[in-house]
Amino acid sequence: MKPYKFILSGGGTGGHIYPAVAIANELKLRFPNAEFLFVGAQDKMEMQKVPQAGYAIKGLWIAGLQRKITLQNMMFPIKIVDSLIKSRKIIKEFKPDVAIGTGGFASGPLLQMANSMGIPTVIQEQNSFPGITNKLLSKKASAICVAYENLERFFPSEKMILTGNPVRQDLISIDDKREEGIAHFKLDKNKKTLLVLGGSLGARRVNQLIEKELEFFLEQGIQIIWQCGKLYFEEYKKYNSAYVQVLAFVERMDLVYAAADVIISRAGASSVSELCIVGKPVIFIPSPNVAEDHQTKNAKAIVDKNGALLLKEYELDELFEVSFENLLKDTEKQKQLSQNIKLLALPNATKMIVDRIEKLLK
């Protein structure tokens, strides 16, 4: 029997790339002889991250629409046509059995072309409020794997399956890694540790907040691991000290989560899914600059079940210090948030998604 071939697309941010890689890894476990090809957006981080994970990738000339009139927006229709033509050529040459999209600029043209060529397609929708591309693609998709309930108003219910978002497998059992995490990051085991996550590229407003509140944090007697993102590292590395570690990127997420007592995070879909599994007290600061404000909706889905706290960017100056101090002092509240967020975890997401893909091969 000829080996199965899988084409995957997801990129722009780690939140789209890592789920695609997790799905590919699980498919590889089940079908060791399978062939894989990723399709990403030229010049985006997937062009480095996917080869680092051991997979081949081809780039499309595609980018998102800006919110203002720019030359890039005027080029958008040309880029779409170019990406559709290139996607068709890639699919014709590679001849995949299934095409899988986890979001990002390139997955739209690739899945659209796969649909039109009669190749089974799987959409992995990570957010509680889907973007326009996945809504359009869903009409012809073979299966739609979702991470949140109540998405029937966006997608055909007969195609939908609630799986959750794929997460790194090493996060599923971090409870016994605390000592290793503290040693790895050279932390003081007698101090509380605050972990700040701004996403792989970084979050300007979160970084500005941490810079402004550094003295306040140190007065609380805590130590900080501050993942500021690669775009901001040069600006903030000057704050490295005995109690503040400024990092562009965290390689060992399992150990950093294990060491943390309280977490401040953006509310991208992958981050939210990871934090549910990790089960630590979280303050979400959603980015307001994403399509259809889906980070706020992701965070609200957790907050409404009393699993986390939520502060919007415009509330930070007024409410942050009191919210943070209250949480730090209230161990009962910390325990309650931890228990509730863990109840929302879907740790078998990757396996469930691959189960669904496997059905399409039959």
Image (cartoon, grey):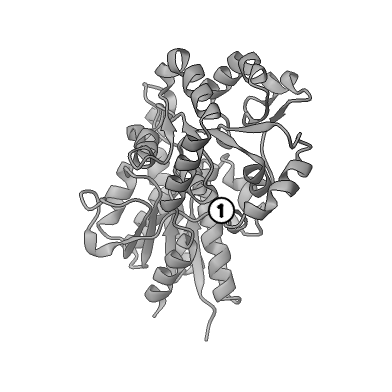
Q: Can residue 271 be seen in this view?
A: yes
x 38%, y 73%: residue: 360
* Viewport quadrant of the C terminus: bottom left
Identified at 40% across, 32% down, the residue is: 290
Q: Residue furthest bottom?
A: 1
Q: Mark 1 points at which residue?
A: 58
Q: In which quarter of the image is residue 241?
A: top right
Does residue 69 appear left or right of residue 223 in this picture? left
Q: Give the residue drawn at x 60%, y 57%.
A: 173
State whether residue 232 is above or below residue 141: above
Q: In which quarter of the image is residue 193?
A: top right
Number of numbered callouts drawn: 1
Q: Position of residue 171 (x, y in %)?
A: 59, 53
Measuring from the top left, give residue 308's x and y in whole percent.
43, 37
Residue 304 at x, y = what percent? Answer: 33, 39
Instruction: Give how far across and how far down residue 327 sits, in percent.
Output: 50, 29
Whether residue 84 is visible here, answered yes or no, is: no
Classify mark 1: helix, strand or loop: strand
Task: Name which residue type carries label 1.
Answer: Lys
**Location of residue 103 with respect to 314 vertically, above or below:** below
